[in-house]
Amino acid sequence: MSSISLTGQDGIQIDSRVLADFADGDVASLTVPNDLAAVKSSKNGNLIYAFNETGKQCELSLRVLAGSSDDKYLNSRLQEMKNDFSKFILLVGTFTKRVGDGAGNITNAIYNCTGGIFKRQIEQKTNVEGDTSQSVAVYPILFGNGGRAIQ
């Protein structure tokens, strides 16, 4: 028997704020840039394994409407970080991917990320030929620790 996966109405939360002012396309992309573990082969077929702590880091690219209330919130948090990095309260992210099975049952894939900082400043452009991306603010965020749970 085949399996079915229906997705929709995903949720994205930064700190305790539920975000809603999303742009077009991939509004949020959560990636894991580092390997979780490494293995080396050695003489006589011996194997050496090591857990890589940096494998728990997650990078988020978050696309919100420029000038929206979510943009204003995220920008204020970015300014807090720039004004006093030592005093900055790290970001927390929760990303919920809702998956249906076609029979009315829902499974949630929940990504919990902690220790977040803004990785770069927000880029902007001006275009006179109707490029809609000039109305989008893209926030690159790096989380020190992330994990996935299925419920």
Image: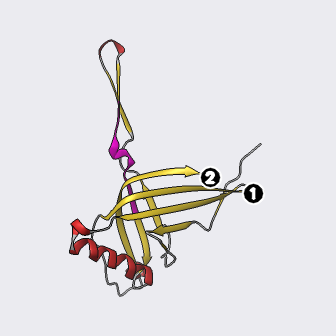
Q: Quadrant of residue 38?
A: top left
| Start-end of magenta stretch | 50-60
Position of residue 123 measured from the top left corner of the image (x, y, whole percent): 30, 74
Position of residue 108 measured from the top left corner of the image (x, y, whole percent): 61, 57
Q: Please say if 110 is above or below 13.
A: above
Name the residue: 37% across, 72% down: 138
Position of residue 111 measured from the top left corner of the image (x, y, whole percent): 50, 56
Is residue 27 at all visible to an observer of this figure?
no
State the SS at label 1: loop
- The answer to if 51 sits in the magenta stretch is yes
Name the residue: 43% across, 79% down: 70
Q: Which of 95 and 27 is in front in this view?
A: 95
Q: Residue 83 carries which label?
A: none
Relative placement, left or right, of 140 versus 25 is left
State the SS at label 2: loop
Distance of mark 2 from mark 1, alpha carbons?
17 Å
Quadrant housing the N terminus = top right
Amino acid at dot 2: Gln
Q: In which quarter of the image is residue 64?
A: bottom left
Viewer-nearest of labels 2 and 1? 2
Q: Which mark is residue 151?
A: 2
Badge 1 density bin: few <14, some 14–19, many ≥20, Cα 10 Å? few
Name the residue: 43% across, 57% down: 113
Q: Please say if 54 is above or below 83.
A: above
Q: Please say if 44 is above or below 112.
A: above
Q: Earlier in the sequence, mark 2 or mark 1?
A: 1
Q: Please say if 40 is above or below 130.
A: above
Position of residue 50 measured from the top left corner of the image (x, y, whole percent): 34, 32
- The answer to if 110 sits in the magenta stretch is no
Farthest-out residue, bottom: 128
Amino acid at dot 1: Gly
Q: Mark 1 points at which residue?
A: 102
